[in-house]
């Protein structure tokens, strides 16, 4: 091979080498482009992921902020705004005389400001309003919730002894008048003494040993024992087996097993067993059924009899008695008898007793009635309580409330 052929061959090799180098450069460039493209995609993905994560974090933060705002608003509403509005509304109710609504709103506020105090004030004002308007039964209910508040105890004590008898006990049965004028009785009903469900418009009640009598607002007398035809009656009493009724003209009508009698010039009556005790229009005493010394029974305003004794309260506040019990005691507003006991309320609204029943036994009594071995009382809680011996369910009075309360005449 000559020199020319060698140069030709060298030139061809150079061309192939250049072509190979060019191809390798192209492949390298392509690789670089692929790498850049991959890096770009990776970078874009990282950026997208970053922003997605950032957005997610922003959303979470916004949600948290929103929740915090909602919770803060709820907390403000529950602890600041709502109590404030409720309190202001309760004050408005009280100013408008809507005392029950005021109490409900104040009570719902718990310890907020002076709400608990104003809840009691609502009962107090309602009680005073009801007293002033003569709604004594409802007044007792309102005031029963706030014992010891202001002069609440004195207000209730002032009612004791001033009310017509609307609860009583017989030998073994008990009865009371509801505020709506109907009567409920429990205990021995062997002689129909508890058959009072149909009585209506009742203003006063009295129990004999085995019967029940009532006076209606219209002045009629109802009885489970016998038909009593008299009208314009203002007061009733029942002994062991008799009924006494006093009419508007101060005539006393006496009924015993079909026997009738009338006595004029009587203005107050009390009965127990065989004794009928009366105050005349001259303020003296007349007693039937026992031979008793009544010389000291003058200038009377109240009279009571029980267990063979007669007790009188004079207009000067002193007590006279046929058995010496509390005889000469002064400073007395009203007297009661029950369970072989004389009970009296002083002008300072203190209850004092002499006999089987202690002052503690009848603490808070508003009305009291019974015989010589058991009695019932209306307490300042507005409920009836029974004390002493019981037979045939005569003591089933635990659920009795809403007792009718109307003032006696002359008080």
Image: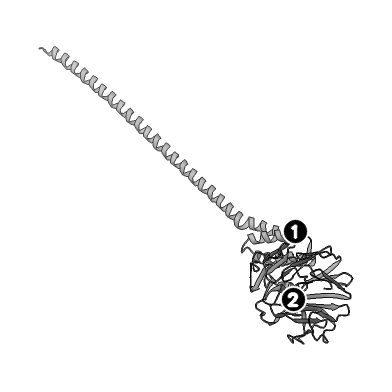
Badge 1 marks a residue whose secondary structure is: loop
Q: Is residue 220 left or right of residue 365?
A: right
Say above or below: 21 vs 381: above
Depth check, front residue: 83 or 15: 83
Residue 188 locus on image (x, y percent): 67, 67
Q: Which quarter of the rendering shows the N terminus?
A: top left
Residue 232 locus on image (x, y percent): 86, 66
Residue 335 locus on image (x, y percent): 76, 78
Give the alpha-carbon distance from disc 1 to disc 2, as whole Å. 27 Å
Identify the image quadrant of residue 401.
bottom right
Mark in front: 1 vs 2: 2
- The crowding category of the residue bearing disc 2, from other C-alpha atoms within 10 Å (few below 14, some 14 to 19, many at least 20), is many
Residue 85 locus on image (x, y percent): 67, 56
Badge 2 marks a residue whose secondary structure is: loop
Depth check, front residue: 123 or 252: 252
Q: Which residue is mark 2?
A: 273
Residue 221 badge: none
Q: Is residue 351 visible?
A: no
* Residue extending farthest left: 1
Depth check, front residue: 4 or 54: 54
Identify the image quadrant of residue 168.
bottom right
At horizontal 65% and vertical 78% (from top left) the residue drawn is 360
- The crowding category of the residue bearing disc 1, from other C-alpha atoms within 10 Å (few below 14, some 14 to 19, many at least 20), is few
Say above or below: 79 vs 270: above
Say above or below: 63 vs 238: above
At horizontal 89% and vertical 71% (from top left) the residue drawn is 249
Q: Which quarter of the rendering shows the C terminus?
A: bottom right
Q: Is residue 214 visible?
A: yes
Identify the image quadrant of residue 373.
bottom right
Depth check, front residue: 71 or 42: 71
Q: Which residue is mark 1?
A: 198
């Amino acid at each position: 091979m000559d020199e020319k052929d060698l140069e030709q061959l060298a030139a061809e090799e150079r061309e192939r080498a250049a072509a190979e180098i060019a191809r390798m450069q192209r492949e390298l460039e392509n690789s670089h482009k692929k790498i850049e493209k991959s890096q770009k995609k990776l970078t874009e993905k990282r950026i997208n992921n970053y922003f997605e994560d950032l957005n997610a974090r922003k959303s979470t933060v916004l949600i948290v902020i929103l929740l915090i705002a909602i919770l803060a608003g709820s907390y403000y509403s529950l602890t600041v705004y709502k109590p404030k509005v409720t309190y202001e509304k309760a004050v408005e109710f009280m100013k408008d005389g809507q005392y029950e609504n005021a109490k409900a709103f104040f009570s719902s506020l718990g310890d907020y400001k002076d709400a608990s105090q104003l809840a009691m004030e609502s009962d107090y004002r309602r009680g005073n309003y009801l007293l002033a308007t003569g709604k004594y039964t409802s007044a007792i209910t309102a005031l029963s919730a706030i014992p010891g508040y202001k002069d609440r105890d004195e207000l209730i004590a002032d009612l004791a002894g001033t009310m017509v008898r609307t609860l009583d006990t017989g030998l073994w049965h008990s009865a009371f008048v509801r505020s709506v004028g109907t009567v409920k009785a429990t205990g021995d009903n062997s002689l129909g003494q508890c058959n009072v469900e149909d009585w209506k418009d009742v203003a006063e009640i009295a129990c004999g040993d085995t019967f029940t009598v009532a006076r209606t607002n219209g002045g009629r007398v109802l009885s489970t024992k016998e038909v009593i035809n008299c009208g314009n009656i203002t007061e009733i009493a029942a002994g062991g087996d008799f009924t006494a009724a006093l009419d508007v003209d101060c005539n006393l009508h006496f009924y015993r097993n079909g026997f009738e009698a009338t006595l004029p010039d009587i203005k107050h009556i009390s009965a127990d067993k065989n004794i009928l005790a009366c105050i005349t229009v001259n303020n003296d005493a007349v007693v039937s059924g026992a031979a008793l010394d009544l010389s000291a029974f003058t200038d009377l305003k109240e009279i009571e009899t029980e267990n063979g004794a007669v007790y009188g309260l004079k207009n000067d506040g002193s007590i006279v008695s046929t058995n010496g019990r509390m005889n000469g005691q002064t400073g007395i507003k009203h007297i009661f008898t029950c369970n072989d006991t004389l009970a009296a309320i002083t002008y300072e609204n203190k209850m004092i007793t002499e006999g089987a029943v202690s002052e503690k036994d009848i603490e808070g009594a508003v009305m009291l009635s019974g015989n010589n071995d058991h009695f019932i009382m209306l307490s300042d809680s507005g409920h009836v309580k029974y004390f002493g011996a019981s037979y045939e369910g005569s003591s089933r009075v635990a659920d009795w409330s809403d007792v009718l309360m109307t003032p006696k005449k002359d008080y």
